[in-house]
Amino acid sequence: MADTGIAGRPDTNGHVAADAPSAESAPRLSLLGRTLRQVAGQVQRRVPRADLDERDPDFIRERLPLMWLAASVWYRGEVRGLGNIPDSGPVLMVGNHSGGNMTPDTLVFTLAFNTYFGVERAFYQLAHNLVLSMPGLGSLRRFGTVAASPGNARKALQSGAALLVYPGGDYEVHRPFWQRNTVDFDGRKGFIRLALQENVPIVPVVSIGGHETALFLSRGEGLARLLALDRMFRLKVLPISLALPWGVNVGDMLGHIPLPAKITIETLPAIDLKAEFGPEPDLDEVYDRLMRLMQDTLDALAAERRLPVLG
Amino acid sequence: MRATAQTVISAPIETVWSFVSDPEQALSFMSGVTRWEVESEQPDGLGARYRMLLRVGSAEVGGLIEVVEWEPPRELAWTSITGVDQRGRWRLRPISEGRTRVEIRLAAGVAGSGLAGWLAERIAQPAISSHLRSTVAQLARLVEHERMREQAAQRRAARTGR
C-alpha cells in the first residue's frame, strides 16, 4: 500500500470533490479525460469517512498469525528497539517505507507493534486515499488505517493513540532502485507541525529491505502529470517497475508478488521536539536533523546487509 | 501449539522453586524472553500478574499473564489475560535427595485465527520447543552453579571457623 504523509494540505480528506480539470482544458483527451474523471469521482465516493471507531482489536488479533507468517517466513522480518516507543500515550511514529504499493515494511512493523503492545493499544496508520478505496482493501480500516489528512492525524493523536505516518508517501515508495537506501520525504514537513501542535513525541522508524522486493525503475512523474493523475487522485507518480508476475509493471495498481527480501526495522529513541529544539522549534532545523538521523541509521542498516534480497 | 521440555537438576526442590517462582530471575534463564515485568502489587503468588514477551520469528509475542496455580514448591501455572492465548506451567518433583525433575509446558495460540493460525502454530512450534529446552538447560546451569557457590561458601566458613 502506498501510504502518504501529511504534507500540510488543506483538510479535504478526499470528500470535497478534487479540483478536476475543466472540460475545455483538455479537448483532445476528452474521452479519456471524461473516463478518468468518472473514475476519480468513484474513488472519491469510495474513500471511507475517517472513523477511528472502525479499528477492531478482535479482527486484528485474529489476523496476527497470518501477518506473522508473511512477516516471519516470507520477509524474515526483524524489528529492533520497540522499547523506545513510550509505553502509553499519544506518539507520532515517522517512518521511511519502500517496495511500491505493497510496502512490506508496514506489514512487518504493524505486526510487531500489535504483538509488542497488544491489540488493546490504539494504533492508527495513515494511508493514501487510493489504498483505502481499493476494492478488497476495505478491511484495512479495521486494522486502524485511516485516510491521510492532517485532520485525521490530529484526531488520532487527540484520542491518545499511537500514529504511524510515512511522510514520503507515494513519492518515496516508488523511488528508483538505485535510491533504495535513501530516506526521501520530498521535503514534507507537515508531520513536524503536527507533532508540535499536538505536543507529542516523534519516534523515527527506519526500515530497509522493502525496495528489494521488485526492480523499481522510475516514478513516472511526467506520465502522471500528463494524465492529470495528480489533480484527480492526489497521485504524483505513475511508477514503472519490473515485478512478478507482470514483468513490466506500470502503475502498480494491482500490486505485485514481492520478492522475499529480508526486512529490518530499527525504532529510534523518542524525540521531544520542544525539549530538544527549544520552545519555538524551527521546522527546517527539525526536518534536517531528523533526516540526518534517519539516513545515518539507514546507512548503518545498509552496511549490515551482505546480499540484496537475502539480507 | 504445545511445547514441553524437562530436565533433572542436582539441587533440592526448594532451591529450584526459588528460581522458577522469582520474577526477577525469569530473564536470566528463560530463553527468548525479552520482557518479564511484575504488573501486580504482589510480585508472586496466586494472582500475581506479569507482562511477558517471547521472541518468535519476526515478532515478540506474549502479553499480560496471571498466576492461576501456586503450590510451592511443586506447581506454578499461569494463563493469559491479554495477548496471545497461552497457558504455561512449571512442574517440579523431587526424585531423590538433592535431585529434582523440572518440567516446563507451554500451550499457545490465537483462538479464531483459522487455517493461518494453525499453520503459524505449526511453524512456530520448533522454535518455541527449542526456547523451552534452552530454558531448562539454562535453569539447571544457574541453579547448580548457585548451589556450588553456596557449598563452597559453607566449606570456606567451616575452614575459617576452625
Image (cartoon, coloured by chain):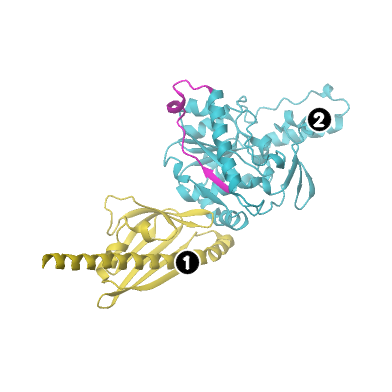
**Up/down of B153 relative to B96, above or below:** above
In the image, the segment drawn in magenta is A264-282
> Observer-nearest residue: A63 or A258?
A258
| Residue A270 among those drawn in magenta | yes
Are both tags, 1 and 2, on one chain? Answer: no
**Up/down of B136 relative to A95, above or below:** below
Name, please, the residue furthest toward the top: A280
Task: Say the numbered circle drawn on residue B52.
Answer: none
Q: Chain under label 2? A: A
Q: Chain under label 1? A: B
* x and y, in percent, of residue B44 in the image: 28, 57
Of the 4 image quadrants, the one containing the N terminus of chain A is: top right
**Up/down of A290 relative to B51, above or below:** above
* x and y, in percent, of residue A36 in the image: 79, 34
Residue found at x 60% / y 46% = A303
* x and y, in percent, of residue A205 in the image: 54, 40
Single out the mark in the foreground, 1 or 2.
1
Residue found at x 82% / y 31% = A34
Disc 1 residue type (three-letter): Ser
**Up/down of A126 relative to A214, above or below:** above
Task: Say the numbered circle drawn on residue A226.
Answer: 2
Look at the numbered disc 1 and give the secondary structure of its residue: helix
Task: Say the numbered circle drawn on residue B130.
Answer: 1
| Residue A301 among those drawn in magenta | no
Say few, some or many: other residues with alpha carbon within 10 Å of mark 1 (under 14 / 14 to 19 / 20 or more).
some
Name, please, the residue furthest toward the right: A28
* x and y, in percent, of residue B94 in the image: 28, 75
Chain B's colour is yellow
Residue found at x 40% / y 64% = B135
Chain A's colour is cyan
